[in-house]
Amino acid sequence: MSSKRPILIIYTGGTMGSVHDPRNGSLVPIDFSQITNHVPELHRAGISIEAVSFNPPIDSSNINPLHWRKIATLITKHYNNYAGFVILHGTDTMSFTASALSFMLEGLKKPVILTGSQLPIGMPRTDGRENLLSSVMIAALKEASGEPVVQEVSVYFGKKLLRGNRAHKQSAHSFDAIVSPNYPSLVDAGVDFKVNHIALFRPNCSTINVKTRFESQIAWFPFFPGMSFNLFESILEKESLRGLVLSTFGSGNAPDSKPLKNMLKHAIDRGVTAVNITQCGHGGVKPEMYATSLMLTECGVIPGGDMTNEAAITKLMFLLGETDDQGLIRQKFTSNIRGELTTH
Ligand code: ASP
């Protein structure tokens, strides 16, 4: 039997596997076998690689919870046969998928690494080759005990391995497209892989338990000066609305408006779960630091601390998919369940 660490690559689509359509010049996905042909080093890395592909591969703008379920199901189906999993995914919504998978895969004890690229893998200056190769090699890393070094959902980009539910796409242009504004990198890829051991997540249960239900009846609202609360109200009144993510100013502040307060209170009283996330790229919500955040607390809006918008949205979708017990949702939303939230 081979002693090579087996890694399963799941190709979903995205720029890494795209070529220019000669008809209109836009990027369209190619099939997976052509991607691995561009990285012959994969076969020399002492790692046994197998791959499955979405058929057809998709641009990540089209990703939805059914695709998250498909990825999670592939991981659990093959969980015992591989040392780790590398998911090739478009960068546009990679941090949403990474966050969603982190909540779905409770008790994960193997690496699930999402990566992609800013340039297609066939292009001379592509970042795809390095991203793919390093992701596979990090997925194969093991401790002296034989356990995988990484036991969580993460994102590899710009020579860094980041926690998946802390990741955020910050640039449509730079090779460092994905960052982790509120949490250190897990691995830095220089000449060697430098593992930041104290930053790694370790699950507190020993068996994997996959939960695949997500609630999609959620609205995401960034505040801006001069916004019309009437438009906001028309969404808040929708019967089907179950969750509301408010992207607020600074440390969690909103316009100090009586009509806004009344509409929020009304929605929350009828069972809509509303959460508060900062629209700043860095830092988090500090409830009641300013009087302008007091109103949100009084209405029953749940503070989201330093979670990214992506983590907060997918966490709310996930929790509302699990239960409609408001107390339980509040308790879980304000707890650090997969390393997504700083709680001290
Ligand atoms: N539109 C592409 C996608 O997210 C962009 C990328 O892969 O970087 O699928």
Image (spheres, grey):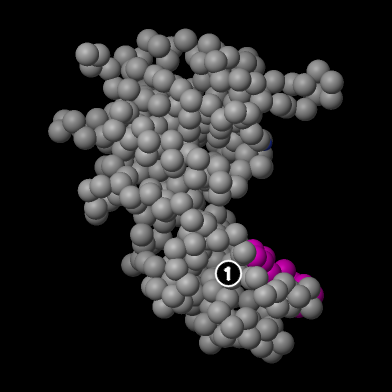
Q: Where is residue 32 drawn, in percent x and y? A: 56, 20
Q: Is residue 259 something one can see in this rendering?
A: yes
**Residue at the spot x=44%, y=42% of the render?**
72
Badge 1 is on which residue? 243
Q: Is residue 196 something one can see in this rendering?
A: no
Residue 271 as seen in the image, left or right of residue 106: right
Answer above or below: position of 88 versus 202.
Answer: above
**Residue at the spot x=46%, y=52% of the render?**
212
Q: Where is residue 270 drawn, in percent x and y? A: 59, 83
**Residue range corresponding to the magenta coloring:** 219-229
Q: Where is residue 253 drawn, in percent x and y? A: 59, 75
Q: Where is residue 242 drawn, in percent x and y? A: 59, 70
- Quarter of the displayed picture in which ligand 1 can be seen: top right
Answer above or below: position of 250 versus 233.
Answer: above
Residue 326 as seen in the image, left or right of residue 89: left
Q: Given the image, on which type of amino acid does mark 1 rest? A: Gly
Answer above or below: position of 341 versus 10.
Answer: below
**Residue at the spot x=56%, y=65% of the render?**
278
Residue 224 as seen in the image, left or right of residue 301: right
Mark 1 vs ligand 1: CB under 8 Å?
no
**Residue at the spot x=27%, y=36% of the render?**
149
